[in-house]
Image (spheres, coloured by chain):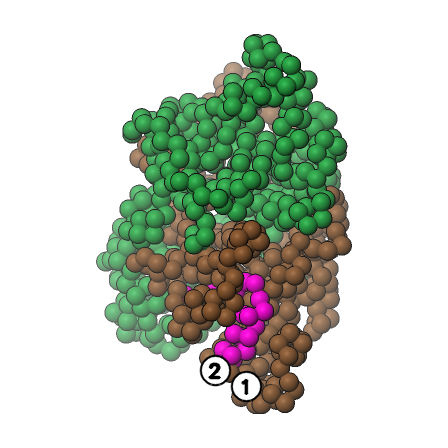
Chain colours: A brown, B green
Amino acid sequence: MTSLPLNGIRIIDLTRIWAGPRATKLLADMGAQVIKIEHLNHADRAKPNPTTESSQRKMNRATPFEQKHRNKIGLSLDLSLDEGKTVFRDLVSISDVVIENFSAGVMNRLGLGHENLKALKPDIITVSMPGFGNSGPWKDYVAYGVTQEQITGLYELTGYKDGLPMKTGTNVGDPMNATHAAIATLSAVVQRLQDGQGEYVDFSQYESFSTLMFESIMNYAANGILSERKGNESHYQSPHDTYQCKGTDEWVTIAISNEEEWRNLCEVIGKADVAKNSKYSSQQSRHDHRKYLNYEISKFTKSKSKYEIMNLLQARGVPCTAVLNTQDLLVDEHVKNRNFIEHLEHPDGETHKYYFGSTWRENGSTTQAVRSPAPLLGEHNGYICAELLGISNDKLDVLAKLGLFATFSDN
Amino acid sequence: MSENDSTIQNSPEPNLLSGISVIELGDEISAAYCTKMMAYLGADVLKIERPLVGDSARSVGPFPDSAPNIEKSALFLYLNTGKKSITLNLESSSGQKIFKSLIEQADLVVENLPPGKLESLNLDYIHLSSINPDIVMTSVSDFGQTGPYKNYKATPLQHYAFGGLMYITGLPDREPLQMKPRLPEYGVAQNAFVASLSALWYRDSTGIGQHVDISTAEYSASILENGLSMYSYTGNKLGRSGNKGYGRAAWGIYTCKDGFVGVIAGPEHKWSAMAELMDEPRLADEKYTERSGRQIYAEEIETLMEPWLMSHNKQEIFEQAQKLGLAFAYVATPEDILNWEHLDNRGYFTEISHPNAGSYKYAGAAFQAEGIEPYWQRAPILGEHNDEVLLPIIENLKMDIQDLKLEKTI
């Protein structure tokens, strides 16, 4: 593809932290021009990488910011000043989408709610994504990723058998809500092509995440059953667990779905006789005897590396993978073969950078998804104000003196 | 449960995907959730299932009274709202001929068969695009259509393991943990929607169809984007830290009077609200304000929080904290969720009845938009639309419907 599907679409991105920025990352990857608005007093770069660099470099290279802002351009703008709002309104009049994940009501208080924006650009699409939506008794409640994961019940279902609910290692709700928000935006843009109408999308992060784990709710509704935490076991497959391998903190997972896989597993671990024993001939009986069977499987797995085990078992059609960490992913043969890890130099960093590429590929394309690195704070102020908005240099000087476009170097 | 057959819940309005014809060759979640959203937005989704057994989701459950029945699986009913179902054996030559006739009229095929399966039936993208040159085909699989592991098998356990999510979940001195819901499969289905819609849009402006390849393993890995950046700067990989984020107090799960509550103190400027909430002036000590202090003095802070937490219920802790602007939560059960006034007030749930399974409360859409009319229709019975969809094709191909039924082609 020489052109990208969303070329020509301009998105004003006021989102912060993760779910919103990742949504606009997906749209930027597909060719939309995404303008990330921050300000020195309100930068979205909360956690700089822990190095001894100067504060300005640290903030520009803040690690959580990096991945989510590739392919975007950056504007530093103080929306608390009237002059800042004027620049913002001018930008709205030449844009297609405004997306934000502030608490409900913040945009209205700034005088920049959907109705205000529609007056400037009748077919503007506004995507508003607070924690619990823009209506209802909880609309003013605030939520981080961890709030969402608890209140949707994800932690209720995650944990060691007989143990407490367990936090997930990274917030899964944020990136999953991001894709739903990208879907909502894309859908509204497609709809506008047909009817010429703008759109107001009320996006509750709670509702978005909750739709992805509705089975347990339906199970309760149908049967009154509350699911128990089962660690890595399954209620209908056995063996189904995580097993220790040679080395420190090295693991594989094995999940047996049918009798053929069971026989092949036994043969690979040198226990063909166990497969012949009628005592273990059903998922239920294997589940009942899992202590012994897991002991036998672990004896085998502890003597080999996780990759050796994965390759031996997969060669016999047994679902088994190594438990990978970040470092493993970077050197994995399959990940490398599919060019999933991309590289790009950051303008303010000498370190070679890694990015995850696009999570889909068209016609076997290996075109790099990461076209440009995350913007420095206010990196594209000149382009946006002078070229897109046509603000004169004299006017820009006046506005700059008000601190409207402050960046780290002004600190 | 009522036994009435209500099909269309809301009057269908022209919606953004109306007129788009989608064929789903999906098993369980990773194709079906994508096309469920498409059906909701007005697309005409035709699900092709195996004769007699259908989609495996029909056999997975959960079932009412835990009694297996292919028309009563909650997983299937939820994932297939708004679709039509036909049965077709793609292994047979007459089944393949019928399938190719369906392809002539389709805009999009979404499939999650094992990579290579459609190629072995001469029904892969190359063959289908020779019948319908601008067709878009989206293939979802465990590891992708290419690469050394393309034929490796995976279950939900492996999706968590290979993508790196499992390694960082659980206690540092114990085995890593999966999450119970099958999130990677739902996530990859969301991605399939975005990729398919952008490919259709690209087709509309260029006339060029595409084959989109999406890997569940890569989707799962992409969730670790924060960890990847950190590793690239510092060489530190994320590990497991149990129930406390970053080893800090007041950023994790704590026991309260009637369950588990999320104490999430948030940024420095909100810390003073903690002392007010828990009626414990000692929590206002300046040394706890900074995040680093909450790590150093974690045990002290937790000792101060405990009496208040143990004397309050999860719902009241959540609501009182939120009223002070603190992003608290609690570990909700399905029972809690079904009873929240907030969700009813927003019209999140939709009651949908099915002639065999009865009436259930379903989760609504992932987002609400003023210009999109919700279009909820129950999931189809296996082969419910065989006559409507297949009879004209069978007639056109001069095949005999009785023969097709006898040889289990349909």
Which residue is at 28% across, 46% downward? B339
Q: What residue type is labelled 1?
A: Gly
Earlier in the chain: of badge 1 and badge 2, it is 2
Q: Position of residue B29 (x, y in %)?
A: 52, 37
Q: Position of residue B61 (x, y in %)?
A: 43, 30
The correct choice, above or below, for B9 with respect to B61 in the image is below
Q: Mark 2 points at which residue?
A: A81
Name the outermost residue toward the front: A195
Q: In which quarter of the image is the C terminus of chain B?
A: top right
Which of these two is toward me, A355 or A79? Answer: A79
Q: Where is residue B89 in the image (x, y as percent from the top left)?
A: 61, 20
Which residue is at 73% across, 55% downward? A3
Q: Quadrant of residue A393?
A: bottom right
Is residue B351 left or right of B20 when viewed as pictured?
Answer: left
Q: Residues at badges 1 and 2 in contact (C-beta under 8 Å)?
A: yes
The magenta region covers A84-103
Q: Position of residue B243 (x, y in %)?
A: 44, 55
Which of these two is toward me, A60 or B80? Answer: B80
Disc sitting over residue A403 in the figure: 1
Disc sitting over residue B402 in the figure: none
Q: Are marks 1 and 2 on the same chain?
A: yes
Q: What residue type is labelled 2?
A: Leu
Residue A90 among those drawn in magenta: yes
Would you call the spot at circle 1 few (<14 residues within 10 Å), some (14-19), or many (20 or more)?
A: some
Which residue is at 50% across, 59% downward? A198
